[in-house]
Amino acid sequence: MERLLTTTDGSHTLFSERFGQAYHSAHGALTESRRVYLELGFEYVAGQNPPVRVLEMGFGTGLNALLTWMEAEKRGLPVQYTALEAYPIGLEDVAVLNYDQVLKSNRLRALHEAAWGEDVSLSEWFTLRKMATTLEEFCADGERGSPVEEVDVIYFDAFGPRTQPELWTAEIFTALAKRLRSGGVLTTYSSKGSVRRALKQAGFTVEKHRGPPGKLEVVRAIKR
């Protein structure tokens, strides 16, 4: 099992022994996910023509997917959600997370028990496809001519640039931009100068926004 941590807002996160980093901010897992991915990402594109197509790099604990599913239900907005995860957590880790308790939900286990590699309709409004792959392989498949369905928003939630520097490059962001519709956005918690420069090199217009507690700024990158 991964090590369980309680963050400042009372929501849990896990500490990855493989990567030596927690999945979320110690200042609030729930607060961070809502600010970076829901407010700056999902809500930005939710007014476009449905369905909203989300691509998440780093399914992790499932928190971003859970919040998006709940928002889709609240809005009555169909969402097609694709999540990449090369190192899925076990159901024993899922069982100790308190997201359902905090959010008054009962959906977290369904997200983690959903089959991999196929579309799973979890409700009238939310369809999930989990892909057991690395980001590099996913991007390479696109370069090799695999069918590419454009998405509206990318949640870029990989472990940090110091931990996984190979994922925060102009080459990766360029490949992801090809999967993003014009006007679509990529949001991420990292506002490091090297990350912003790589996004700009990939053709994005980069905006800095107020971050959640413990994070001065975060990034929303728009494909023009």
Image: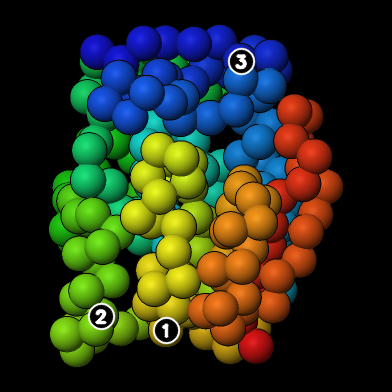
Residue 194 visible from this viewpoint: yes
Closer to the camera in the image, 55 or 214? 214
Residue 69, given in percent of the width and then of the height, sits at 51, 48
Q: Which mark is residue 142?
A: 2
Placement of the N terminus among the 4 image quadrants: top left
Residue 78, given in percent of the width and then of the height, sits at 51, 66
User: Pointers 2 and 1 in contact (CB under 8 A)?
Assistant: yes
User: Pointers 1 and 3 in contact (CB under 8 A)?
Assistant: no
Nearest to N terminus: mark 1 or mark 3 = 3
Is 107 left, or right, of 46 in this rendering? left
* Type of amino acid at the residue the image marks with label 1: Lys
Label 2 vs label 3: CA separation?
Answer: 37 Å
Q: Which mark is residue 7?
A: 3
Q: Residue at x 71, y 44 (%)?
A: 35
Quadrant in the picture for residue 82 = bottom left
Nearest to N terminus: mark 2 or mark 1 = 2
Residue 38, given in percent of the width and then of the height, sits at 65, 51
Q: Residue at x 67, y 41 (%)?
A: 34
* Type of amino acid at the residue the image marks with label 2: Gly
Question: How many numbered callouts?
Answer: 3
Near mark 3 (Cα within 10 A), the count class, few <14, some 14-19 or many ≥20, is some
Label 1 vs label 3: CA separation?
Answer: 35 Å
For label 1, the SS is loop
Residue 62, given in percent of the width and then of the height, sits at 41, 37
Near mark 1 (Cα within 10 A), the count class, few <14, some 14-19 or many ≥20, is some
Q: Residue at x 78, y 59 (%)?
A: 208
* Type of amino acid at the residue the image marks with label 3: Thr
Nearest to N terminus: mark 2 or mark 3 = 3
Report the residue marked by disc 1: 178
Q: Residue at x 61, y 68 (%)?
A: 197
Colouring convention used in this rendered image of the protein: rainbow
Q: Is residue 30 above or below residue 33?
A: above
